[in-house]
Structures are given as structure tokens and as C-alpha cells.
Amino acid sequence: MSLPTGLRVLVVDDERPALDELAFLLGQDARIGEVLMCDSATQGLVMLQSDEVDVVFLDIQMPGLSGIELAQVLSRFRTPPKIVFVTAHEEHAVDAFEVRAVDYVLKPVRADRLAEAVRRVVDDGDHAPTSQDLVVPVELGGVTRLVRRSDVTHVEAQGDYARLHTSDGSHLLRVPLSQLESEWGPAGFVRIHRSLLVALAHVTELRMDGGHCSVRLSDGSELGVSRRQTRELRDLYLRRDG
């Protein structure tokens, strides 16, 4: 769907200065081939019914049809475009997660942050999430980002919160580890210690040494397994490889 010269994007924002600035910044990015603009979600929907784009950079709070509502409609397209929300409001991150947005950029938009969003769009084309994958809204340095669950190697309890570890770093999630164990268990996350969950998909090696068990993960880290969890983990790991 992408043009040979780069991504074809649509920018939707009801505030003209924000619309012009975002379109200008995107136009400076060598990965962008063409930038289309419109000032309402309704107009954007009309355009997209007859004109394909690779990604929509979308405001959320707009008169009439909201950005979230437009994204919900676009998700039912045969070939839906990627969605990047660009908004001044942090509180819609969970809604963005539910419509599988690639990124969530807060205004005022910085050029480097927008470049990161474009990178995520490009990477998403090569590593699209499966129907069983989730994206999780997390905060880092006051910025809300979306992290794919499939990228999480392990989860560490931190009081009433959980810290998600990926190859790119770690992110604090305001959810207790016990809740994630219950919700993410069907996706292959298992408890190896009172304060740790690991993603079986990222376990590359199971080690036994003098009765002590540990796992090596795809990012190179090694984590100890409690005696209580060793047998269950070993059985799960062998079943997975079998």
C-alpha cells in the first residue's frame, strides 16, 4: 500500500495551526512520501472510503465524530490504515490501546517524538501484532507510550505495581502482578517466583545447576526460579518445545 517514495499519511485535526504544524513536521521526514490533511473526523472518513493511506495521525477530541470513533470505524476496513493519536489529553490512552493504535503522542508535538512515532509505524509493518497480541499504555518521562505485550520478556512486581521489561527498557504499569498473572496467563506468561512472571515465548534456555533452576531470556538476561515453581515451569517448557 505504501508509495515507493515513502508512507502516505492523512493528518486529521480540527485546529488549523496544529494541523499545519503536524503536516509540516511530517513532510520533513524522509520516510513520508505524501501528506494529506483534513479538519474533521467525518471528512477524514469520507476521504478514506475512496483514498487509501498507510497511516492516519489523528486528534481525539473533535466536534462530531471523535478520533477514537473514527479509529473504531477504520478498524473494520478490509485494509485498515495504522493509527497514531496526537492529542493534548493523556486520559484516552486506554481507549487508544483498545483500537490497537501504533502510538500515542502528546501535544505540543516535538519533532524527535514524531520521528519516533513514524519509526514505530514502519516497524509495525514488519512486526504486526497477532489477533492475540495486545498493546499496553505505559508512561515514560511523562509521555504515554504503547508497548506490545509480545515484546515483554518478563514482569517484575514493584509494590502494588508491575514493571514490564522489554529489550528496549522497562515500564511501570499501575496494575498488580497478580492481576497480570490472571489476565496474561493464557498468552504464555507464567510465574517463576513470588515477584516475577516470564513470557515463555522469550525463554531460550532452562538451566538446572545443583538443584537450582534459572531461565535465560531472549534479551540475554537470566532469572532465578523458585523451588516451588521449578517443576511446573519445567513441565510447561518441555511441553512447549515438544
Image: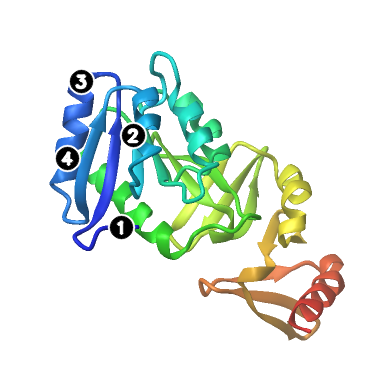
**Gap in angstroms between the C-alphas marked 3 and 1:** 26 Å
The residue depicted at 39 percent of the width and 23 percent of the height is 42
For label 4, the residue is: 25
**Gap in angstroms between the C-alphas marked 2 and 4:** 22 Å
> In the displayed structure, would residue 38 be above or below residue 172?
above
Side of 24 where 231 appears, left or right: right
Percent position (x, y) of residue 117? 33, 47
Type of amino acid under label 2: Met
Side of 54 where 96 appears, left or right: right
Earlier sequence position, callout 4 versus callout 3: 3
The residue depicted at 17 percent of the width and 40 percent of the height is 25
Earlier sequence position, callout 4 versus callout 1: 1
> In the displayed structure, would residue 60 be above or below residue 182?
above
**Gap in angstroms between the C-alphas marked 4 and 1:** 19 Å
Q: Quadrant of residue 214?
A: bottom right
As drawn, the label of residue 101 is none
Q: Is residue 194 visible?
A: no
Side of 145 where 21 appears, left or right: left
Mark 3 nearby-residue class (10 Å; few <14, some 14–19, many ≥20): few
- Per the image, label 1 sits on a secondary structure element best described as loop
Can you say which quadrant of the picture contains the N terminus? bottom left
The reply to whether discs 3 and 1 touch (Cβ–Cβ < 8 Å) is no
Earlier sequence position, callout 2 versus callout 4: 4
The reply to whether discs 4 and 1 touch (Cβ–Cβ < 8 Å) is no
Type of amino acid under label 4: Leu
Type of amino acid under label 1: Ser
For label 3, the residue is: 16
For label 2, the residue is: 47
Mark 4 nearby-residue class (10 Å; few <14, some 14–19, many ≥20): some
For label 1, the residue is: 2
Percent position (x, y) of residue 67? 43, 27
